[in-house]
Amino acid sequence: MPANATVLITAPPPALLQGLRRRRPDLTVAPLEEGFPEAVPGPVWCFVDWLLPDRSGLEMVRTLREARATRDSHITMVLESPEPDDKRRALRAGADDYLVGPLSAEQLLERLATYEAKPAAPSTPRRKLAHGELVLDLNAHQVRYQGRLLVLRPNELRLLAHFLEHPDQVFSRTALIERIGKDEEVSDERTVDVWVGRLRRALVAQGAPDPLRTVRSAGYVLDSLPDTN
């Protein structure tokens, strides 16, 4: 995560905040509470507890996805147990990933480091992937349809990029977990159905076509468009 990023945490113990600020002074670390500001500096990463004093963490995740300041943030749900159903519910609510708590400074910084280790090289030539009028700019991490910017969450964008890079290849759920799964343990293949469903709904809701095809008992594929030339 780049400098000047913001890390928001629900109900953090004072010792956790102090430890993070001491070890990563480049980050803005603050409690995640109701009434967060309209603008938050830099990229935003939210860590949301499964249970909160006055509401469920799932409800908080949905609120974050609707708020202007955090709708495009990376949201990690902090689960109380590794139950597969809880993991699926977290993803369906809008979380990008999850980990099992209680949250510690070491656990949080390790999660951030996983993504910081994958920066785009500044000298990388601009790369774009296209499927008809659906265009994904890999450098800018943006998707456009008919020139109009679409809003996709990080996991949805990675999934779309994978299929655009490998058209006409059927990928099983296991293969997709291995190729684009994050550093948490994803053992339930139905999690992939949640990923694909979220991507499809996000595209269709914004007026773009769903480019994926379900292959019964096999997985998913993105078919190439016919050559009209």
Image (cartoon, rainbow, N blue to C red):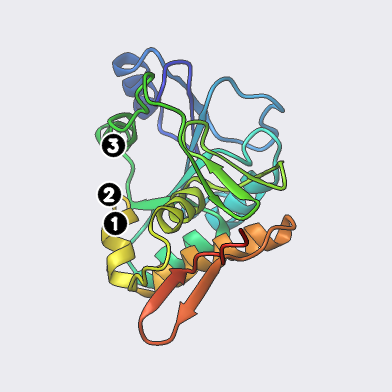
Say which of marks 1 and 3 sits in front: 1
- The residue that label 1 is drawn on is 179
Of the two numbered discs 1 and 3 on the same chain, state the one appearing first in sequence. Answer: 3
Which of the image's four quarters has the N terminus?
top left
User: Which residue type carries mark 3?
Assistant: Thr
- Location of mark 3 (residue): 114
132 to the left or right of 172: right
- Between residues 44 and 163, which one lies in front from this camera angle? 163
Identify the residue at image location x=28%, y=70%: 174
Mark 1 residue crowding within 10 angstroms, few (<14) / some (14–19) / many (20+): few
Give the answer, above or below, for where 40 lies relative to 154.
Answer: above
Q: Secondary structure at mark 2?
A: loop
Circle 2 Cα neighbour tier, 10 Å, few/some/many (<14 / 14–19 / ≥20): few
Label ID, residue 183: 2
Whether label 1 touches label 2, CB < 8 Å: no
Q: Say what amino acid the circle numbered 2 marks.
A: Asp
> Which circle, 1 or 2, is nearer the viewer?
1
Q: Secondary structure at mark 3?
A: helix
Whole-angstrom CA distance, mark 1 to mark 2, is: 11 Å
Q: Residues within 10 Å of mark 3 (few under 14, many from 20)?
A: few
Relative side of 51 to 62, left or right: left
Q: Is residue 81 above or below residue 5?
A: below
Three-letter code for the amino acid on which mark 1 is drawn: Arg
Where does residue 191 sit, x and y in percent of width and height? Answer: 40, 68
Residue pushed farthest bottom? 217
Residue shown at the point (55%, 35%) measured from the top left: 32
Residue at the spot x=44%, y=67% of the render? 88
- Give percent across and percent down for residue 62: 63, 53
Q: Nearer the viewer, residue 105 or 149?
A: 149
Mark 3–mark 2 distance (CA, rounded to whole Å): 8 Å
Q: Residue at x 61, y 58 (%)?
A: 229
